[in-house]
Image (cartoon, rainbow, N blue to C red):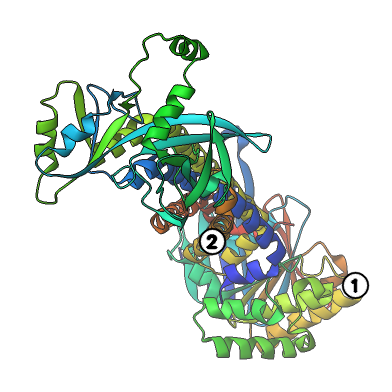
């Protein structure tokens, strides 16, 4: 497939389709989705339940294999009719950071170790991993909670630790699944401002799946999905 | 960063309680193995204590433990004259139940000739029998002490020596008296009608009957050579020490041994299933964490390692505590429990293998966890 010529695009999808089941049970989750996200951008993925948002996030996160299309992440073609890399785990570890709706911190590790874990997985030495984890927590204004266990953190603090974990390996792509759903509007705004700051400072592309209309003003662009199709692409009020 | 230990530390009480429950279960397996060994040790205790190279018994019998054996008392002189026999002694065996402090006490009375083979070889207190009559050497399990007096039949005996670990296959303690006393006791315990008939002057049956003659052979003479000499007398059979022990193991305690072995196997399988369920439940409890770990890039082998490490640690800790509990409590069991280091080693190996096998289902579930599960609300 011919690669598009989009300047600074970190995420590029062309004609991505995904269906589940066959015959009468077939469900088309994604139909011919084409999009690109540039470095420094924070884009939102909106749509009603069942519109395909999660499937699209899973496809970009290299968790679910599409049925057709082409996908390039951070300059590397990862899908062209089939996965182009066998070790998708490594790809996720190196290129993609995940932020979850419910932070998904490991309950048996403190804040620092939750962040340092991904650095260990990437093969960084223990001291270096611990140092960078603490630096990240400080950067995200959660340094004072570096020894706290997840159960001792507030929702906002836990989400900051989760963001620190997502950033630990300096990924250029960050996928956030309802990152503000568990937060009040004030904290949601803080988190979105933080993501915007990260996108600009680290030249990362951030895709946030959300139902949360109050954060739309924090997004550069919005992709709206309906029945697996990209129904609309537009700038947010802020953009 | 060892996630297995971190998680255990985080849920230490839960882990400790699980290990404790498992240790009790594995402790029962260890106890069963110990009882199995104990049964063998009990069965062999008496023949080993008598320490004979050959047992001369009634022809075509597996006596005197497995079958009844009655041979004339003069057999001992005949055996002693055979070339290669160093020493020979007659023995009788008689199970007796007496009343002791209002409670029934079952004993195995062994009659022997002091100074000849057949007596106790392992006195732990007191002295050998030196008088012809009414002295007794008892095993400590009887609860008797030196100087105690005990009524057997119509006579009263004084305890002059104590042994330890001399019991029968049925775990009844053994007491030793002189052969003459034992033969009198056998007559005393014959049915009253026979005794009344004897008292009226009826011809009394010969009381110089023994159950076996035990002999020690010169180290230079093969047992088989002596056996051939003895077998010339058609009314006698010979069993070597090894044959006697084999009979004890294969005939006397065969069913009990099989029962224990089978029970131990069932218990081991039950333990494996329970262990598998525990590991499976622990894994199911952390499926979301596993999905998150997979999503952020943890390889499957590390996740498998996490499960296996926890399973092995649980099994090893449970086994060590269980074995320690049994070792500490083994002497409180009513029957002998023998905890052999070799058996513990084998059981430890079995526990490790069971832990690994029990983890298979949990590992399969963990490997199949979809990383997308971490993103699900």
> Residue A112, how many percent across, how many down?
68, 82
**Secondary structure type for disc 1:** helix
Image quarter of the N terminus of chain B: bottom right
Q: Which residue is mark 1?
A: A185
Which of the labelled discs sits on residue B320, or is there none? 2
Q: Is residue B164 above or below residue B316?
A: above
Chain at tag 2: B
Chain at tag 1: A
Which quadrant holds residue A6?
bottom right
Report the residue at 70% width, 57% height from top.
Answer: B376
Image quarter of the C terminus of chain B: bottom right
Distance of mark 2 from mark 1, alpha carbons?
Answer: 54 Å
Report the residue at 36% width, 47% height from top.
Answer: B49
Between residue A141 and residue A33, name the one nearer to us: A141
Q: Is residue A86 left or right of residue B17?
A: left
> Residue A118, how many percent across, how many down?
58, 76
Q: Is residue B239 left or right of residue B159?
A: left
**Secondary structure type for disc 2:** helix
Report the residue at 73% width, 84% height from top.
Answer: A146
């Amino acid at each position: 497939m011919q690669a598009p010529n989009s300047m600074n695009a970190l995420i590029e999808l062309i004609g991505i389709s995904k269906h589940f089941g066959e015959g009468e049970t077939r469900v088309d989750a994604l139909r011919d989705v084409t999009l690109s996200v540039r470095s420094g951008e924070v884009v939102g993925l909106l749509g009603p339940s069942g519109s395909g948002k999660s499937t699209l996030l899973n496809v970009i996160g290299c968790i679910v294999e599409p049925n057709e299309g082409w996908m390039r992440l951070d300059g590397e073609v990862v899908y062209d009719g089939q996965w182009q890399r066998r070790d998708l785990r490594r790809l996720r570890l190196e290129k993609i950071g995940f932020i979850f709706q419910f932070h998904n911190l490991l309950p048996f590790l403190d804040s620092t170790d939750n962040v340092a874990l991904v650095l260990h997985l990437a093969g960084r030495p223990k001291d270096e991993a611990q140092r960078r984890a603490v630096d990240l927590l400080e950067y995200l204004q959660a340094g004072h909670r570096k020894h706290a266990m997840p159960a001792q953190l507030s929702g906002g603090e836990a989400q900051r630790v989760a963001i620190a974990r997502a950033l630990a390996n300096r990924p250029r792509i960050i996928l956030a699944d309802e990152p503000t759903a568990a937060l009040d509007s004030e904290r949601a705004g803080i988190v979105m401002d933080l993501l915007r700051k990260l996108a600009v400072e680290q030249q990362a592309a951030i895709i946030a799946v959300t139902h949360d209309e109050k954060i739309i003003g924090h997004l550069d662009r919005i992709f709206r999905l309906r029945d697996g199709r990209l129904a609309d692409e537009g700038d947010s009020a802020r953009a | 960063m060892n996630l297995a230990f971190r998680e255990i530390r985080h849920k230490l009480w839960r882990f400790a309680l699980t290990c404790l429950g498992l240790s009790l279960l594995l402790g029962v397996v260890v106890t069963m193995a110990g009882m199995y060994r104990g049964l063998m040790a009990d069965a062999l205790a008496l023949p080993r204590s008598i320490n004979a190279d050959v047992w001369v018994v009634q022809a075509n019998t597996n006596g005197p433990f497995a079958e009844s054996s009655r041979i004339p008392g003069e057999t001992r002189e005949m055996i002693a004259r055979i070339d290669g026999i160093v020493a020979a002694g007659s023995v009788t065996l008689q199970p007796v139940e007496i009343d002791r402090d209002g409670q029934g006490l079952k004993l195995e009375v062994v009659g022997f000739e002091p100074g000849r083979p057949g007596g106790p070889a392992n006195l732990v207190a007191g002295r050998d029998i030196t008088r012809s009559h009414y002295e007794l050497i008892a095993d400590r399990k009887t609860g008797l002490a030196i100087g105690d007096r005990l009524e057997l039949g119509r006579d009263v005996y004084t305890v002059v020596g104590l042994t330890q670990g001399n019991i029968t296959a049925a775990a009844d303690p053994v007491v030793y008296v002189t052969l003459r006393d034992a033969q009198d006791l056998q007559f005393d315990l014959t049915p009253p009608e026979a005794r009344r008939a004897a008292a009226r002057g009826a011809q009394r049956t010969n009381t110089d009957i023994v159950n076996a003659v035990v002999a020690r052979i010169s180290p230079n003479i093969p047992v088989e050579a002596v056996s051939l000499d003895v077998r010339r007398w058609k009314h006698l059979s010979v069993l070597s020490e090894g044959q006697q022990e084999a009979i004890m193991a294969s005939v006397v305690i065969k069913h009990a041994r099989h029962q224990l072995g089978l029970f131990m196997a069932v218990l081991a399988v039950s333990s494996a299933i329970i262990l598998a369920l525990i590991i499976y439940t622990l894994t199911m409890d952390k499926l979301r964490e596993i999905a998150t770990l997979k999503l952020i890039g943890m390889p499957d082998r590390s996740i498998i390692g996490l499960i296996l490490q926890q399973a092995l640690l649980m099994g090893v800790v449970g086994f060590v505590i269980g074995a320690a509990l049994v070792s500490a409590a083994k002497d409180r069991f009513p029957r002998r429990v023998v905890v052999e280091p070799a058996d513990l080693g084998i059981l430890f190996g079995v526990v490790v293998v069971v832990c690994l096998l029990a983890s298979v289902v949990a590992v399969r579930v963990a490997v199949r966890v979809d990383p997308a599960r971490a993103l699900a609300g």
